[in-house]
Every structure is written in structure tokens, then in C-alpha cells.
Amino acid sequence: MNVRKFTASTSRGAWSLVREALGPDAVILSNRTVDGGVEILALAGEDMASLSDPVIEKTISENTLAALAPRHKAAQPAPLAITAGATQAAPAGEINSAELHDVMKEIRSMRGMLEMQLAELAWTDQHKREPAKSSVLREMLAAGFSASLARYLIERMPAGSDNQSGMDWIKTILTRNLATIGNENEILEKGGVYALVGPTGVGKTTTTAKLAARCVMRHGPGKLALITTDGYRIGGYEQLRIYGKILGVMVHSVKDEADLRIALDELKGKHTVLIDTVGVSQRDQMVAEQIAMLSGAGSQVKRLLCLNATSTGETLNEVVRSYMGEGLAGCILTKLDEAATIGSALDVVIRHKLNLYYVANGQRVPEDLHVANQQYLVDRAFKLKRETAPFQFNDAEIPLVMANTARAMNEKSLREVILG
């Protein structure tokens, strides 16, 4: 492999030199303005095949330094060293730290570009050799799963699989890694103090009412207590109070950690205590304050994070990281009926190894709350009718999407996915 440098007065002229020397399939590695002209570093198209060699990084570094070193020596005078009041020239050819930083930055940039181009070529080649993997990959992306998780699983899919067996394998792995409570005894029989937390508008109050109704149906209203910390939203307390009145359960309102500690101490005889918290954006510093309040209440408060199934994977991932604190008891997936795809939500639950308690798919209390079922959710992720053609990837775009996952493959969350 040989990285070559071409210099001309204009970009058009430099590109003409590249085409004459390396042909129309040449790969442009960098393009910059130097000394009033334009400099292009390029690689012949046929040399791309050699880039899979393990010594690629060393080769790139050596060729890049060789191409750049003359320019740095010519462009900058020798640095001066001051010793004992006399000024002396530093040794010839020595590069100062700023120049070295620029060179290393350029090398890293070139390496990233080459990694992306290699990944594109690899996936294009794989599409031709293993069309079944490409088909399964397209299904995962269309269902909302992240490109990094999809690539991680596709690369480990059994060789020789056809479309159906490949999809069956993927569903089995996803189901195995989606943790659920299995039945309601975790809450309804064991009881305890549960706080529903999450951003604004995810349905915490309605979900609290649904859980409260189930507890009352199992143990009666005397065994349940409701607490709200929502003193910010207009009508927040009133909404829960109306639900409590229907169920025959008193609703207590608290403002701070001291109030919560007193309320929990008074209600320690209750079988179950449900806390409806104020909705806070994941980027608000109040999240940390809310976690501290619940953790310092003097009683073991289990936090259940409500995740909006209609949100993007990036948003959900940010929400989980913000609300994680010292650990979440689990999560509840809300607004399932409004989501066009749920793969992104399942992806985040799997990545963070959250215990999925319930899924909510409507406003009815308590009907629209169901114990999470792994197989049903994974099947639903792939069966949802998708009127999302503008947001789906075609065959030509998939290699570019996969190219951007090269560095994400080392994420700890992916390495912990159970395959067998």
C-alpha cells in the first residue's frame, strides 16, 4: 500500500493529478490548503484490498509521516532554545509538540476514514456472499434496534443460516437477554415501597393508579398507601387524589426528604406503598436531587423507571443513564400502543440489563397494564406494521450505517450479551 501526495494551485488541478496517477477509483484520504495551494493525500483503489493487513496502522502512520515531514520542516524555522542568556538553534529536523499534535490528529482522522471505508467494503462484500445476514440485519434496523447491537448479533449468527433460521436465532437471543419479572408476585405478594420515576409525560401517575388498583384487588384498600411528590405540575396531586378516592385509598403529599421520611414512618404498617414522583427531564440536575431524596428516606425505596416506548433509542439511553443512580429495581415500558417500533426500547432494556416489570398500552385503569412477556415483545418488535418507508435503509445505505459502528463494537454492554 502506498499513500501518495499531490499538490497543485487549485483543487481541480490536484484532483486531475490524482486521477492521472491513480485512476478514477482513487481513495482521497485528506484535502487541505498549504502554502497557497491544495494538497491531497490519496490511495490507489486497488490498494484497498491490502488494508485488511494487521500492520495497517503502522503502514498508514509511516507513510503519513513521510509525506508530512518535509512540509513541516520547510514551513517552520528551527525552534530556538535559550540557555544561560544565549540563544541557540534546536537540532535540525526536530518537530515541536504543536506540530506533533497536528500530525497525530491527522493520522487518527485518516485511520477513522479508512476504518469506515473498510467497513463499507466489508458489508458490501458480505451482502453478496451472505444475503441472509443482510436480510436479517435490515429487519433488525427496521424494527428499531441499534446498528451496533444488530451488527454484534449478525456477525455471530450461525453460518449457513437462511432468512427464517436466522430470524429465529436472533429472536431467541433477544428473548434470552430480555429480563422480566415473570409474574406479579414480585410486587403484589412481596409488597414494599416503590417509587415510579422518569421524565415528564411518560405516564407515571396513570401507571401508579393502575398498580394501585391491582394491589387493592389483591389485598384491599387498607393494605395500600399512595404518596405523591408532584407539587410542581398543576393538578398533579388532584389527579392521583381522584384515583385514590375511587379506590378508597388516602393520598399523602410530601415536599422534601424530611416529609417523605415522616410519611414512610407513619405508613410502615402498610403492605405496599406507591410513590408518584414529579417528572424531571433527564438533563435536569433535579434528577440527582430526586434520587438523593428517595435514597435518604430511611426506608428501602425501590425505584421503577418509566420508559416511553415512542422515544428514540438515543433518548431512552440518556434517560436510563441519568436515572440509574446506585441502581434501579426495574422499569415499566409505557405508551406501547403509540409506538411505531419498539426495538429501540427493547435494545436499551437489554443493554442496561434492566428488569422489565410491566408494559402499559393505554389509559384504562387498571386494564391497560400487563406483566412483560419476553417472547411476545420480541415478536411484536418485528411484526409491528411499519409505515416508515422514509426512515428505512435500502441496500446501498446499510454499509454506510454499519461503517459507523466500528468503534461501538467494544462497548461493555454488547460484550455481556448472552449468545448461548
Image (cartoon, rainbow, N blue to C red):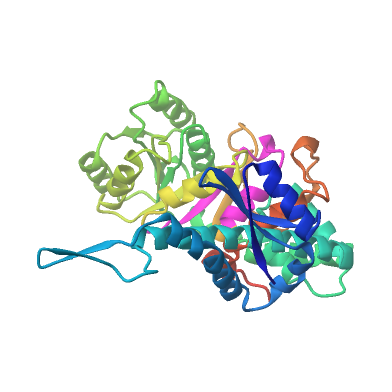
Residue 294 percent location from the top left of the image: 31, 48
Residue 96: percent from left, percent from top: 34, 63
Q: Left or right: 51 with respect to 349?
A: right
Query: Is 121 or 348 nearer to us in this picture?
Result: 121
Q: Is residue 296 visible?
A: yes
Q: Residue at x 25, y 51 (%)?
A: 296
Q: Which residues are magenta?
A: 326-349
Depth check, front residue: 393 or 324 = 393
Task: Give yes or no for residue 342 being in the magenta stretch.
Answer: yes
Q: Quadrant of the N terminus?
A: bottom right
In front of the other: 224 or 196: 196
Rendered position, 385 above or below 157: above
Q: Position of residue 368 (x, y in %)?
A: 63, 38
From the viewer's perspective, is residue 339 above or below residue 125?
above
Which residue lies at the image location 40% right of the left edge and 36% below the top edge? 280
Q: Quadrant of residue 406?
A: bottom right
